[in-house]
Structure formats: structure tokens, C-alpha cells
Image (cartoon, coloured by chain):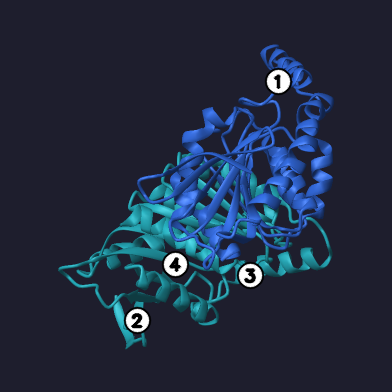
Chain colours: A blue, B cyan
Amino acid sequence: MQVTSEQRLDDGVRERAFTLGDIPGFLWTPESASASAPVPLILLGHPTLGLARMYSRLVDRARHSAAQGFATATIELPGCGERPRWPAMEQTRAELRRTLQAGEPVGDELVDALILPLVDTAVPEWQAALDTLLALPEVGGPVGYSGGVISIGIRLAAVDPRIAAAGLFAGSYVPRTTFQEARQITIPLHVLLQWDDEGNDRQAALDLFDAFGSKEKTLEANMGGHTGVPPFAGEAAARFFTRHLK
Amino acid sequence: MQVTSEQRLDDGVRERAFTLGDIPGFLWTPESASASAPVPLILLGHPTLGLARMYSRLVDRARHSAAQGFATATIELPGCGERPRWPAMEQTRAELRRTLQAGEPVGDELVDALILPLVDTAVPEWQAALDTLLALPEVGGPVGYSGGVISIGIRLAAVDPRIAAAGLFAGSYVPRTTFQEARQITIPLHVLLQWDDEGNDRQAALDLFDAFGSKEKTLEANMGGHTGVPPFAGEAAARFFTRHLK
């Protein structure tokens, strides 16, 4: 992990921009975090829009988490932001745009092509990031995963026992294999669903929630459209992590 | 309103048992409530098991609400507890038990017979109770309604503009007319659904949530069976009332 820049935000949160090989990322730690008082870590998932475009929302989540005593970290997704272009993925996204513009249904094969290569590539990268982040003296376990592409969160929770709790956002296309992986998950889950999210398949989100093997799982559905998660829902998600990671 | 007994609970909450005509009820007020500092009121709904059997759960909800600065009140449902028997209702309930024991589906007509007379009778009684309770100097508005038979809460919220926010529990049979009334509701709603509640029609609960006309509505689904609402869900419901009644 190469720290490429570092700053203190006005609320005392320490922000480190880093690279892991050619993958850029951010680590935010609360002022209190130290080798003698390591803090739990929440991995901040995000959509495939690139870290630069997501930065202000990510830093907002990082500040809120720091106020609750959590370190947070995120890395760029493959083919996004300043990472090398991924022509096959760009072609699939173009195909998705064409399908949506034509008002055609988004078939299983397109969803698989859109999501599975992303999951297959991203999840080992997030695991490698976790290896590195947990080796820092001021960052401890347990680890939470929050938001982003739901299939990445589900695969990560299914394959990596270090993930102790996950807050997921039902708002992406979901391949059939993700449903199978959901059944293997037993950690506590907090799932946000925007009920009136027009771009989201509500029934698929409900089916996915049903599929999770976890004994403790909460679905919170709200109004406000895809990007209109109400502040109180963010606070409920924060309390979920406090319950399970502290 | 005739106060039939009064006591201070150990946390300072004032409990008054009362009758309104032949209807028994309870009023709980926090220690701080006074004519110069009236507190908002939450009506505590409950199932048709009788107040005596529900008392310990009701007083628990009352204490938690008092700690948040709310008065709470409840009245006995028609045909329940010590109120006069209601032979037609008892016959319908016997028919429901027979249907369930036989493993037969509970049809719309049986649901209507089970719920609609109860709603038609109970709602004006809760409104009359509200008239009386709001006339007390230490009780002010706005008013919330919480829990109990969901069709009673929906009818009350649809017909009485004094109800400013409602916390509903998706766990009862729902007549078709309740869906129509749900569309008329525009106040903020917080709906609890026990996802693995075997006695509850989950799809009907989701359809009902969809039907509500409210711009702010939250569905929180959890595991734990019909009576296993987790403590954190109760806390989330309490925060909902604090957001809207304070």
C-alpha cells in the first residue's frame, strides 16, 4: 500500500489516498484510532461510476462512520475511474444502454455479462485490500461491508469470513448465481430498498432478501427514488453496524 | 372519563385505569407531563386478546414511550376482555379456527366478517377516546397511532385528521376495503413486517404497503416470527414517532 496523499478533514478524520498495485483507494480513520486503540473497519462499496465522481458521497459516509468510531476504506472498481479501460465491459454497458433505450427487457445473459466479470475481478481485489488494511496497527476487526454493487457485497460476504456484517443496497441488476450465494450467507444483514426506484426490479430485491440464509436480516424500504435514501435510513444502517461491529 | 384506579410506576410514569362509558382503558403519562407542558399522545393498538392479557406488553410500550416524552393510551376492543360478549364475532372466530385447523384457505368473506364489524365498531370508540384524552390539560397533540389490528389503524388514519403519524404492524387479516382506505392515507407511516411470520400473508402485507398514498412510508421487515419483533425494531419505531410528533 502506497500512500499517495494524506490530509486531516476539519472534523479530525484522517484521509489517506493510496494505491494497491495499480488500484487507487481511500482510507479514512477517526482521530481516536491508534495502535493501542484500533477501530473496526467498514468497507464502503460504490457503483461503477468511478471514485472521483463518488468522492463527495463516500467522504460523507466516511465522516459519519468515523463519528461512530469506525475506519472506512474503499478501492476503485475494475475498468472504472483512472483504472485501465475494460473494453469488454464497456461493450456490455453499451449493450445495456441500447436495450434500455429500446425499452426491451434486460435478459439474464446481459445481466450475467454485466455483473459477473465485475464480481469475479473485484472481490479478490477487495480481499487483498482487506489483507493490507487489517495489517495497519490502527485498524482492527471485525469488518463490515456497506453498499455498492450488491452482487459484490454478497460474494464478498459469502467467501470471506472476515466480513462480520453487511449493509446492502438493493439497486443493481442481480445475476442468478447471486441468489445461490445469498443462501450461503449467515452474517447479520441490513438491506436498504428504495420502494419507488424505477430502475430497480422490486420483486427481484424482495426475492433476494428472502434468499439470504441469515437469521438476523432486516429489510428497510423507503420512498424517494434511487438516490433519495432518507437520512433516517442512513442512521438506521449506522446503528446496525454499531450493533454488530462494536 | 372515569378514573377507576391510579398508580405511579417505579420510573415515575403515571398510570390511570379508566372507563369511558362501559369501555375500559389505560392512560400513561410521563412524569414531566403537565398543563403547562402537555405531551404528544400515542394511541396503543393491540390484538383482540383483551387488555388484561396484553397488559404487560402494553405497559412496556407505555414506559418506553414515556421515556421519549409521550403519553400513551389504549382502550379495550369491542367483544374483548371484560366488555360484553359479541356472539356474532365469537361465531366468526370459531369459523376461522375451524378453517385453519382444516388447513383450508381463509376466504375474503371470512376475513370481511372477522375484521370489518370490529373496525366499524372500534374506530368511533377510539375517536371518542381521543376527544376525551385530548381535553386533558397534560395531553396535547399531535397524535400517533401504533400497532394492533392493522385495519383499525388504517381506518382511523384515513378518517381522523388528528392522527399525524402511524406505526403499523403487518400481521392481521386484511379485508379488501382496507386496501382502498390505505390509498387515501397521506400521513407518514412506519410499517413493521415479520418476514417469517407463518400466520401472516406476506404478499398481502407488501401489497398493502405499496397501496399507502403516503410520500413518507417505511417498511421494516425482520426475522423472529410473529411475536419476535427484535428490540432494535421497536427502537426504530420509537424514533419514527419522535421524528413526527415532536
Q: CA distance from mark 4 to mark 3?
A: 16 Å
Q: Amino acid at mark 4?
A: Leu
Residue B15, numbered circle: 2
Residue B48, numbered circle: none
Q: Is residue A3 left or right of residue A177?
A: left
Q: CA distance from mark 3 to mark 1?
A: 52 Å
Q: Amino acid at mark 1?
A: Arg
Residue holding disc 4: B44
Q: Secondary structure at mark 3?
A: loop
Q: Secondary structure at mark 2?
A: strand
Give the foreground label among 4 and 3: 3
Please tell me if label 1 and label 4 are on a single chain.
no
Give the foreground label among 2 and 3: 3
Give the foreground label among 3 and 1: 1
Q: Amino acid at mark 3?
A: Thr
Give the foreground label among 1 and 2: 1
